[in-house]
């Protein structure tokens, strides 16, 4: 068994310690984060995750290896594990979010009609490369298990390769959200060389429809980017946003990429950013039912890897009982967002809709920001919007806080950070 080394990192403004038991990172090595109920075990290569109880956690912690039954469950090819032990183990949430969506820039090479955060130009106060790298190291120390690099377009920032390399050397799963246009052979090779796990590429229709949303010629360039990514062995997933005006195209896109063995995620439209006046494009419950039937031959075939909001969510019950409800909306629970200036919000859609930041990682550590959030009423203050939305919508019932906030009544004010319970 590999020798372990104990390292410590201090959280913001207090004496709490985050302990990491480091071993040499190898392909397929698991990450294990301590929780009040036991632990969150994660395979950064497959993206599979399992919650384990306290006895299982102690067994893995003492032996330094993952038992065979858990290896099979998360598709792990080795028993090697890297353990992170956050100092704060709340009883009402995880000890850290699973995934951070890091918007490393607002600069973008295209100007999509429904961009949720109004990307295009770089923000005047975006972090420096050194600040970005310090922030990423802080996220690693906090117990986060995956970082999705988004924007804007993350590939316009040269430090993206150093960020991916740093994350992968520390065992985290690393993905990018990209339009694919900038992916030329040399870019694809660099991404593969630094260990990128997944590229999520946006495609919202076949050629004419996609180009009308994302700019003339963008479909052809995006397809070339996808081909280059697959050529160097980087897994690709296509995200497509479904609206009333592109339902037929979404079906065509899904069938097209499924035939190419590319997984597809069909996302709902959230009227935020440049889409703030597009609520009329959101599908009704009946339209989703029709779409589900049209895609049934794909969603029922496990080899096609097609899923989507209100279409096929692949909900799986936790293997053990948790002391809190695992919410389907990940905001402030299993996911958080870091903006280009270091501000932290619970969801990328909630900020453009009026949510105030819960901290800033230029001058705070993430563990301290997470504790402030968990100890606050911030998420509860947004969940009160859900019953009203669900009782009045013609669309599907939802737990999405962004949709509920986007379509709130006019007398609800922007959501300030609720600091204490």
Image (spheres, rainbow, N blue to C red):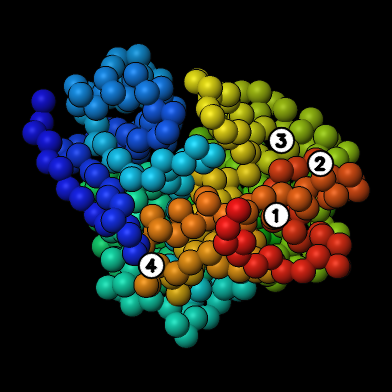
Whole-angstrom CA distance, mark 4 to mark 3, is 39 Å
Judging by the rendered image, the residue that carries numbered circle 1 is: 382
Judging by the rendered image, the residue that carries numbered circle 2 is: 396
Apparent side of residue 5 relative to residue 29 in the rendered image (left or right): left
Q: Earlier in the sequence, mark 1 or mark 3?
A: 3
Residue at image location 58% in from the left, 50% down from the top: 331
Q: Earlier in the sequence, mark 2 or mark 3?
A: 3
Judging by the rendered image, the residue that carries numbered circle 4 is: 364
Q: Earlier in the sequence, mark 1 or mark 2?
A: 1
Label 4 near label 1: C-beta < 8 Å?
no
Q: Is residue 288 above or below residue 49?
A: below
Q: Is residue 227 above or below residue 274?
A: above
Q: From the image, which quarter does the N terminus lie in?
A: top left
Secondary structure type for disc 4:
loop
Label 2 near label 1: C-beta < 8 Å?
no
Q: Which mark is residue 311?
A: 3
Apparent side of residue 293 relative to residue 17 in the rendered image (left or right): right
Secondary structure type for disc 3:
loop
Q: Earlier in the sequence, mark 1 or mark 4?
A: 4
Q: Earlier in the sequence, mark 4 or mark 2?
A: 4
């Amino acid at each position: 068994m590999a020798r372990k080394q104990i390292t410590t990192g201090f959280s913001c403004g207090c004496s709490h310690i985050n302990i990491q038991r480091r071993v040499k990172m190898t392909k397929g090595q698991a990450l294990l984060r301590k929780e009040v109920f036991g632990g969150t075990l994660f395979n950064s290569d497959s993206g599979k995750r399992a919650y384990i109880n306290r006895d299982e956690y102690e067994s893995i912690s003492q032996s330094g290896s993952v038992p065979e039954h858990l290896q099979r469950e998360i598709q792990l090819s080795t028993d090697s594990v890297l353990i992170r032990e956050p100092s704060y183990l709340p009883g009402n949430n995880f000890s850290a979010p699973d995934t951070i969506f890091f918007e490393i820039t607002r600069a973008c090479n295209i100007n999509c009609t429904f961009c949720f955060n109004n990307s295009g130009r770089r923000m005047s106060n975006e972090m420096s490369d050194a600040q970005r790298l310090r922030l990423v190291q802080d996220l690693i120390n906090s117990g986060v298990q995956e970082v999705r690099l988004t924007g804007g377009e993350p590939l316009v920032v040269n430090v993206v390769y150093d960020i991916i390399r740093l994350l992968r050397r520390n065992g985290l799963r690393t993905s990018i959200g990209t339009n694919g246009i900038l992916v030329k052979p040399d870019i694809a090779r660099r991404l593969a060389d630094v260990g990128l796990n997944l590229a999520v590429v946006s495609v919202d229709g076949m050629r004419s429809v996609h180009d009308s949303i994302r700019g003339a010629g963008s479909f052809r360039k995006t397809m070339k980017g996808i081909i280059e990514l697959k050529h160097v062995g980087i897994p690709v997933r296509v995200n497509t946003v479904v609206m009333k005006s592109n339902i037929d195209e979404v079906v065509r896109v899904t069938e097209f990429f499924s035939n190419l063995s590319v997984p597809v995620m069909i996302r709902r439209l959230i009227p935020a950013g440049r889409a703030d006046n597009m609520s009329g494009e959101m599908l009704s419950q009946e339209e989703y039912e029709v779409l589900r039937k049209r895609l049934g031959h794909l969603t029922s075939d496990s080899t096609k890897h097609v899923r989507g909001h209100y279409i096929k969510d692949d909900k799986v019950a936790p293997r053990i009982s948790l002391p809190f409800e695992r919410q389907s909306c990940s905001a402030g629970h299993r996911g958080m967002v870091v903006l280009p200036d270091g501000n932290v919000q619970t969801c990328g859609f909630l900020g453009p809709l009026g949510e105030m930041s819960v901290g800033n990682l230029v001058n705070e550590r993430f563990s301290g920001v997470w504790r402030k959030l968990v100890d606050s009423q911030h998420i509860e203050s947004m969940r009160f919007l859900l019953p009203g939305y669900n009782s009045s919508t013609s669309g599907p019932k939802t737990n999405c806080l962004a949709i509920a906030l986007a379509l709130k009544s006019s007398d609800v004010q922007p959501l300030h950070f609720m600091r204490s319970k």
